C-alpha cells in the first residue's frame, strides 16, 4: 500500500467563498504516483467545508443565499457559541450542511469523476490562514 | 491490495425518487471477492445523492416534503443557477443535505451494517440516465 | 494491508445529546497498531450521527436548537413515518444534516487532525443501546 499526504493552504479575503480546488487535488494525485485507491480531501478547520458540486457562479450564489437563510450570520447574539467572544457560530452550522470531507475513487491514476464533478473548498469564516488535508492511499 | 470498480445506471421516470440499491452494492461486493476493506458508493452526478437510512416509505415521503420545504423547486426563478436555462437548482441544494457518498466497512465479505442500514440512491433531477460509482478496496 | 474493527456502545439517557468520542477512537487506533491509512467512524443506527466539530457546549446548544428548527420533533403527527407507531421521524432528518460518518486520515499513528477537530456521536433518539463502528485500514 502506498500513501500520500499534503496540506493545501488558503487565506480567503472575504468571510465566505467557494474555491475550486480540483486541479490542486489532481496535482497531489500525480505527485503521489498512486494509480488505484481512495483519496480523502477534508477541511482541517471546523468552520469550512470540502464538497463536490458544479463550478457555476450562479449556483454558488444560490448556495450562499440558501445557507444564510438556513443559518444566518446576524444577529450574532442569537447563538450561544458567540457568547465566548466568537462571531462565527453560523459558520459551524453552514459547514455541517455542506460537509467536512469528500472521498474520491482513484482509477487509472485519475480522480474517478462523473461529467460535472468538481471539488470545492467552502469557506464560512475567512480572513485567516486555514488548511485542507489531502490523503491518498492505494497502489 | 485488491480493488474493484463498477458503475450502476439509473433512469428515474419522475423528478425525484429514493431507490434502495443495497442488493446491487452487495452483488458488487461478491463479484469483487474482497473480504475486508472499505467500499465507497457515490453519485457521479451533482443533483443526486447516495445515503444510508431506513427503507420505509413514510420516511421517504417525509424526506421529500422536508427537502421541498428547505429548498423548494418552484418558483424556479428564485435561483440564479436557473438563469442558465436549467430548472434544477433546488436539486443541487437537496443533494447537499442528503450527501454525495457513503463509505461502508467491509468485514468478512459483507457490508458491515447495523440492523436497519440500507443504501439509497436519491434522485432530485430525474428523467435522464445517471450513474452511481461503487469502488471497493481491501483484501 | 492491516485492518481493525471495533464497536463502541452508547446508551444516552436523554432523547438527544452530543458525546465526544475522540479519545475512544484514539484508543482504537493505538490498539490497531496502524500507523498510516484511513479510519472510518460511522453510526450503525439511522437516527444518530458521527461528525467532526468543536467541543464547545454553547455550540452544541446552538446545534440542538437549529436542528429542532429545521426538523422539529413535535407535533409528531406531522411525519408519515410516525404513523408506523414511531415518534422518531425528526431524528432520521436531523441525522442527515449532521451526517452518518467521518473518514479520518491516519498519519504517524495519529488521527491527522486540524487544531480543533474532535469526533462526536450525535444522538437524536436516545434512551436505548446503540452502536458506532470504528474500522481502520492501513499499515
Image (spheres, coloured by chain):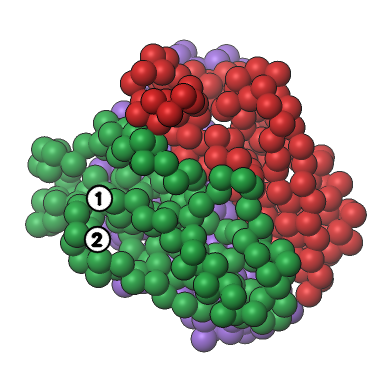
Chain colours: A green, B red, C purple
The location of residue B12, given as percent across then percent down, is: 70, 24
- In the image, taking residue A82 as reference, residue B133 lies left or right, namely right
Q: Compare residues B34 and C47 and report the one nearer the observer.
A: B34
The location of residue B9, given as percent across then percent down, is: 76, 37
Q: Compare residues A12 and B104 and report the one nearer the observer.
A: A12
Query: Contact (CB < 8 A) between labels 1 and 2?
Result: yes
Q: Compare residues C57 and A112 and report the one nearer the observer.
A: A112
Above or below residue B23? Residue A21 is below
Residue under pointer 2 = A12
- In the image, taking residue B86 as reference, residue B39 lies left or right, namely right
Residue at the image point whose x is 89% and y is 61% from the top = B33
Location of the C terminus of chain C by quadrant is bottom right
User: Disc 2 is attached to a residue of which chain?
Assistant: A
The local crowd at label 1, few if under 14, some if 14 to 19, many if 20 or more residues have their Cα within 10 Å, is some
Q: Compare residues C86 and A2 and report the one nearer the observer.
A: A2
The location of residue B26, given as percent across then percent down, is: 82, 47
- The count of marks equals 2
Above or below residue C20? Residue B7 is above
Above or below residue A46? Residue C25 is below
Q: Which mark is residue A50?
A: none
Residue at the image point whose x is 81% and y is 41% from the top = B24
Residue at the image point whose x is 31% and y is 45% from the top = A93
Residue at the image point whose x is 21% and y is 37% from the top = A72
Distance, label 1 to label 2, CA atoms, is 8 Å
Q: Quadrant of residue B120?
A: top right
Q: Secondary structure at mark 2?
A: loop
- In the image, taking residue A134 as reference, residue B20 lies left or right, namely right
Location of the N terminus of chain C by quadrant is bottom right
The location of residue A87, given as percent across then percent down, is: 14, 51
Residue under pointer 1 = A16
Q: Quadrant of residue A13?
A: bottom left
Amino acid at each position: 500500500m502506498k500513501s500520500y499526504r499534503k496540506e493545501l493552504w488558503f487565506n480567503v479575503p472575504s468571510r465566505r467563498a467557494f474555491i475550486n480546488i480540483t486541479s490542486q487535488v489532481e496535482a497531489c494525485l500525480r505527485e503521489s504516483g498512486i494509480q488505484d485507491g481512495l483519496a480523502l480531501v477534508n477541511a482541517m478547520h471546523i468552520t469550512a467545508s470540502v464538497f463536490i458540486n458544479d463550478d457555476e457562479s450562479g449556483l454558488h450564489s444560490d448556495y450562499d443565499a440558501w445557507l444564510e437563510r438556513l443559518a444566518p450570520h446576524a444577529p450574532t447574539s442569537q447563538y450561544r457559541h458567540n457568547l465566548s467572544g466568537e462571531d462565527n457560530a453560523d459558520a459551524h452550522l453552514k459547514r455541517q450542511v455542506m460537509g467536512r470531507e469528500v472521498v474520491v475513487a482513484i482509477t487509472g491514476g485519475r480522480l474517478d469523476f462523473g461529467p460535472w464533478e468538481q471539488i470545492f473548498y467552502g469557506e464560512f469564516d475567512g480572513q485567516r490562514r486555514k488548511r485542507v488535508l489531502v490523503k491518498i492511499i492505494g497502489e
